[in-house]
Image: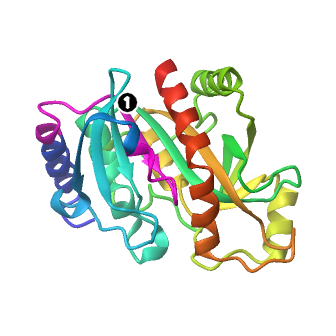
Amino acid sequence: MKNGYSNIAIASRFINNWCGGSAPGLLLILGTGLGNFPSLLQNAKKIPYAKIPSFPRSTVPGHEGMLWRGSINKKKVLVMQGRIHYYENIPMDEVVLPVRACITAGVNTLIATNAAGGINTAYHPGDLVLIKDHINFMGTDPLCGYYDERLGPRFVDMSEVYDPTLRKKAQSSAQQLGIMLREGVYAAVSGPSFETPALIRALHTLGADHVAMSLVPEVTVARQMNARVLGLSLITNYAAGRKKQVLTHEAHLKTANKTTKKFTKLMEGIINQI
């Protein structure tokens, strides 16, 4: 990363100033098609990524590229409406810069969400899945290359990426709201081509329940920086080979839009418990 830590620090100071002195402790990253959540925020303010120093630009439909601040029942939150993907030809250290900047600004808890394909035969489009562990099949790691000890240790313990206490609160919220929340192992691939049936069979053999092209980079650097992490996926399609279908990004968006109400309801419940 050109200028390394200084870019993170500059973005962090900008975010703190924009938030009135200090950033909220909670950051929510919205995945593909899940960008309607900011409509729930009270006293909401937004700023395009393009106006935040050093922030990369999102180029994928369904990722608006807006940073929001506001509150849910008096709990202050930051919301990334859209993320940056490795397959957008953006270096990995820039992909994770927004999360690093937000944590440097004061965030201590990350809720990362995405849209995913269901590998587990019990999963169907519209299901919500709580991530209990992940498999990194992206071919790289966000901690490769540039290193600065101010970001945390270079060799990060990944034994328990997804915080057990947060997962219990998520399950409790889902139960109270009458929402079925599955729990599974997530596999991340680089994309942007969808997976082949052979790869899906291999991932199934390795123990993966669902698959997508994001989330692992952000949660990895969050753990490096000692933030708590909760991961949630919306199943928007059957993984390749599970059903005769043509996989498209537009279908992802369509399913996500149909599930917006359930997703936002669960997010609000979880935030109330954190």
Q: Can residue 234 be seen from the camera position used here?
A: yes
Say if the magenta span includes residue 34: yes
Per the rendered image, the range of residues in magenta is 16-38
Q: Position of residue 198 (x, y in %)?
A: 84, 75
- Left or right, residue 172 beside residue 70: right
Residue drawn where x is 12% and y is 32% of the image: 20
Query: Vertical placement of 93 versus 100: above or below?
Result: below
Q: Amino acid at mark 1?
A: Asn
Q: Secondary structure at mark 1?
A: loop
Rate crowding at label 1 as few (under 14), some (14 to 19) or many (20 or more) other CA atoms within 10 Å: many
**Residue bearing mark 1:** 108
Figure quadrant of residue 244: bottom right
The answer to whether residue 140 is above or below residue 97 is below
Measured as percent of width and height from the top left, residue 242 is found at: 87, 68
User: Relative to the observer, which residue lies in front, 219 or 244?
Assistant: 244
- Pick the front one: 27 or 95: 27
Asked if residue 182 is positioned above or below residue 246 in the image, the reply reads: above
Locate the N terminus and report the quarter of the image it occupies: bottom left
Residue under the image location 44 percent in, 50 percent down: 36
Count every numbered label the image shows and give the total. 1
Q: Residue at x 37, y 44 (%)?
A: 38
* For residue 184, above or below residue 266: below
Rendered image coloring scheme: rainbow
Q: Determine the image quadrant of residue 64.
A: bottom left
Q: Position of residue 184 (x, y in %)?
A: 75, 43
**Is residue 165 shown left or right of residue 127?**
left
Residue 153 visible at all: no
Image x and y of residue 12, in percent = 20, 44
